[in-house]
């Protein structure tokens, strides 16, 4: 078989399956080629390959329709929306992907400059340079791409069998069927991790919980949060049986939460707790130790804080669906009384040299490190310069994700050493109703068979001091424009 017309990932899979790849034609050779849907019952299917529609990460549009995508390919320009962001932009792909798409869409209109061909290793560079969209095989997905939806489907859903960019490859010269059929994507191996920003069940948020029920803050977004394989919550306030009542409203910035509020974290499906917050010891060490016991009794793992510095600095290791993840977190800003020592409970103080050593060791063990910081808070889309330095140091040490849990204001992104950096997500459950403090991200990170694929940005806005909801399209576009403009590309 000739490998030039096949995706590189399929060529590797064929070799691993024992097939010999040859140049040119041979009478005894098995010929592998993409199949039209109407010929699937005529040729044995050797492989089923998922392709994705993607664009550079800082792309505002979230997707398109199947009709518009096919119209672009055919050069028909029959757009349902004349203002579509893809008008006049080429589809970038490799020659092997082009051969596959010809089977799906028919012959493209090259005369209208609808397609740009580039080698696999250059597709992303070309798409970023031209601000274009692209089609890639699933195995080429990486954090610098944004997966676009086709008729509101990305292709990565648990049941993606009807997604239009599945391509079957047939084998001529083979008698009978081919077993097993090779695939490049098994949805059962996809791992999703949702990272969130600040949770502080205090003040007006606590008052609304007293008035409307403990589950009130999560009533709108809980179903979405529960879809994650791992839901991360940075709970910055300790539970305290002696916490003063939330009603009437308590406005002070000395925080504690009624232990009943623990029910909210259970209801939304919390899997991992971050303890780097600077309010955890507002009422002393005893409530924090009580909170640690509460988490332990619920078998809810935590990191970034603990009964002493050793426990606070220890990585939290998670293995799910064959992917190994490790969470590390620290507090870079104090106050000193909130930081753990060997003799006192608290948040892990930031020691970048030690953290770098931990990250190196974790990578050696096969774990993908996720690092979260409690860092300087600024009311700006751009982070403080010291935060930028520390986040990039963690990325250079080998973290695959570096995320800011401290921000009450949505902040920008960067890529460094293959890692995705998000300097600040904003608030999840916290009562700040100022214009930008209401707006925040939930980052849904994707992993597959020990590899980090990238992130889906979920945008939320706070209502009634307590209850986040998904943004409207206009709200989302406004925030992404501001955040992307302040990012380090």
Image (cartoon, helix red, strand yellow):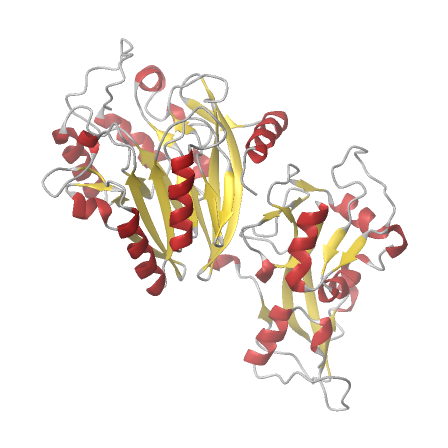
Q: Is residue 132 visible?
A: no
Q: Is residue 174 above or below residue 103?
A: below
Q: Is residue 14 above or below residue 52?
A: below
Residue 99 image position (x, y, % from top left): 76, 66
Q: How many circles with numbers are drawn on the protein? A: 0
Q: Residue at coordinates 54% horizontally, 37% vertically from top-left? A: 487
Q: Nearer the viewer, residue 166 or 471?
A: 471
432 relative position to 362: left or right: right
Quadrant of residue 222 within the rendered picture: top left
Q: For the N terminus, give its image quadrant.
A: bottom right
Q: Position of residue 449 (x, y in %)?
A: 46, 62
* Camera-nearest residue between 392 and 143: 392
Q: Is residue 275 above or below residue 177?
A: above
Direction right: furthest residue? 111
Q: Residue at x 74, y 46 (%)?
A: 66
* Left/right of residue 165 with respect to residue 345 in the rendered view: right
Q: Is residue 203 left or right of residue 482?
A: left
Q: Is residue 395 above or below residue 175?
A: above
């Amino acid at each position: 078989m000739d490998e030039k017309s096949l995706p590189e990932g399929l060529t590797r899979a064929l070799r691993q399956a024992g097939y010999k790849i040859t140049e040119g034609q041979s009478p005894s050779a098995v010929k592998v080629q993409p199949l039209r849907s109407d010929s699937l019952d005529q040729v044995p299917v050797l492989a089923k390959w998922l392709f994705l529609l993607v664009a550079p990460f800082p792309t505002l549009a979230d997707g398109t329709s199947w009709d518009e995508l096919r119209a672009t390919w055919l050069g028909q320009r029959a757009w349902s929306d004349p203002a579509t962001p893809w008008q006049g932009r080429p589809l970038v792909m490799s020659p092997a992907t082009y051969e596959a798409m010809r089977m799906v869409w028919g012959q493209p209109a090259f005369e209208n400059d609808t397609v740009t061909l580039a080698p696999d290793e250059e597709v992303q560079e070309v798409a970023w340079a031209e601000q274009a969209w692209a089609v890639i095989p699933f195995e080429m997905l990486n954090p610098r791409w944004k997966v676009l939806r086709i008729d509101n489907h990305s292709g990565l859903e648990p049941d993606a069998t009807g997604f239009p960019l599945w391509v079957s490859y047939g084998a001529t010269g083979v008698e009978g069927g081919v077993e097993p059929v090779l695939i490049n994507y098994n949805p059962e191996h996809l791992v999703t991790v949702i990272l969130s920003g600040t949770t502080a069940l205090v003040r007006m948020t606590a008052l609304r919980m007293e008035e409307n029920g403990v589950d009130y803050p999560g009533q709108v977004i809980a179903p979405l949060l529960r879809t994650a394989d791992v839901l991360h919550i940075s709970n910055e306030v300790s539970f305290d049986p002696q916490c003063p009542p939330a009603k009437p409203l308590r406005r002070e910035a000395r925080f504690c939460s009624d232990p009943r509020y623990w029910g909210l974290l259970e209801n939304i499906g919390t899997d991992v707790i971050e303890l780097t917050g600077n309010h955890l010891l507002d009422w002393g060490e005893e409530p924090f130790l009580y909170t640690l016991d509460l988490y332990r009794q619920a078998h809810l793992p935590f990191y970034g804080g603990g009964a002493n510095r050793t426990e606070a600095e220890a990585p939290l290791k998670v293995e799910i669906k064959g992917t190994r993840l490790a969470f590390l977190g620290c507090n870079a800003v104090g106050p000193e009384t909130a930081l753990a020592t060997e003799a006192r409970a608290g948040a892990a103080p930031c020691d970048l040299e030690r953290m770098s050593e931990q990250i190196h060791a974790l990578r050696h063990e096969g774990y993908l490190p996720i690092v979260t910081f409690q860092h300087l808070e600024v009311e700006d889309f751009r982070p403080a310069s010291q935060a930028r330095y520390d986040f990039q140091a963690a990325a250079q040490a080998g973290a695959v994700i570096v995320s800011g849990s401290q921000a009450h204001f949505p902040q920008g992104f960067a890529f460094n050493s293959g890692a995705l950096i998000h300097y600040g997500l904003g608030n999840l459950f916290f009562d700040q109703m100022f214009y930008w403090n209401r707006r925040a991200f939930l980052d849904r990170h994707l992993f597959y068979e020990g590899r980090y694929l990238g992130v889906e940005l979920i945008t939320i806005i706070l209502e009634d001091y307590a209850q986040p909801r998904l943004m409207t399209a206009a709200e989302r576009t406004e925030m992404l424009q501001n955040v992307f403009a302040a990012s380090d590309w």
